[in-house]
Image (cartoon, helix red, strand yellow):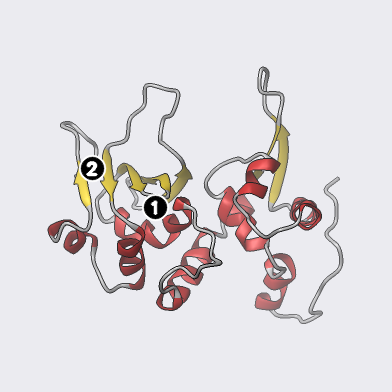
Amino acid sequence: MPRQPRRRSYDQHCAAARALDLVGDRWTLLVVRELLAGPRRYTDLHADLPGVSTDMLAGRLKDMEGAELVTRRRLPPPASAFVYELTPRGRDLLPVLRTLAAWGAPDLGEPRPTDAVRAHWYAIPLLGAIAELGAGVVQVSLDEGEFHVRVGDDGAASYGDGVFGAGTTEVPDARLRTDTATCRALAGGGLTLAEAIETGRAALERPVGAALA
């Protein structure tokens, strides 16, 4: 029986209010952002959510389990570690975060001295631009780190943290190298990916026989 989330309701018979009952608390949508990149251990989540206390993160994860947005499972040996991952209901929040990121992109600006930065935080704002390349997997490299984007035949895009196929023989269909300033311009709509590549602000390498058109 799933744990029921703590009662924090707006008590309004409104779809938006009901949604905010579940995901409107501080940190909840950022936990979703992290888990959209794939299953994560608690310690990894905490490391990529700078500023959240351990008690706050533990409480949010329990509430999200109770709301059936997140599940917790043990990895098989030799790992023997627990990971958190999104349920289908939790993964359905990707379009919400994409819209929220698009709305917030014009206010992003240069990083403030107090701002933490992680490469995969740029994945959501770039999904649309990368999806225009066609179906396949694109490895994105920034000075701050790497992430990869999967684009399906239907144009649906998802992302993962780190190097695609690490520890396996799988390789991406293309590699994109750019910087955070270009990512911000792409996210804000002031630059297209084609323009970034043409002007040298981004470099796209496509191996022979790659899936991307």
Q: Is residue 169 above or below residue 68?
A: above
Q: Residue furthest left?
A: 198
Residue 150 in view in this figure: yes
- Badge 2 is on which residue? 212
- Badge 1 is on which residue? 156
> 139 or 99, which is in the foreground?
139
Q: Is residue 109 above or below residue 71?
A: below
Which marked residue is nearer to the observer: mark 2 or mark 1? 2
- Marker count (numbered): 2
Give me the residue at 26% from left, 40% from top.
174
Tag 2: amino acid: Leu
Residue 84 in view in this figure: no
Secondary structure, mark 1, is loop
Secondary structure, mark 2, is loop
Label at residue 146: none
Q: Residue furthest front?
A: 113
Expressed as whole percent of the image width and height from the top left, the position of residue 72 reads 73, 40
Give me the residue at 48% from left, 43% from top.
161
User: Hey, which quadrant is residue 201 in on the image?
Assistant: bottom left
Expressed as whole percent of the image width and height from the top left, the position of residue 42 reads 70, 42
Expressed as whole percent of the image width and height from the top left, the position of residue 87 reads 64, 47
User: Hey, which quadrant is residue 184 in on the image?
Assistant: bottom left
Would residue 84 appear left or right of 204 to someone viewing this image? right
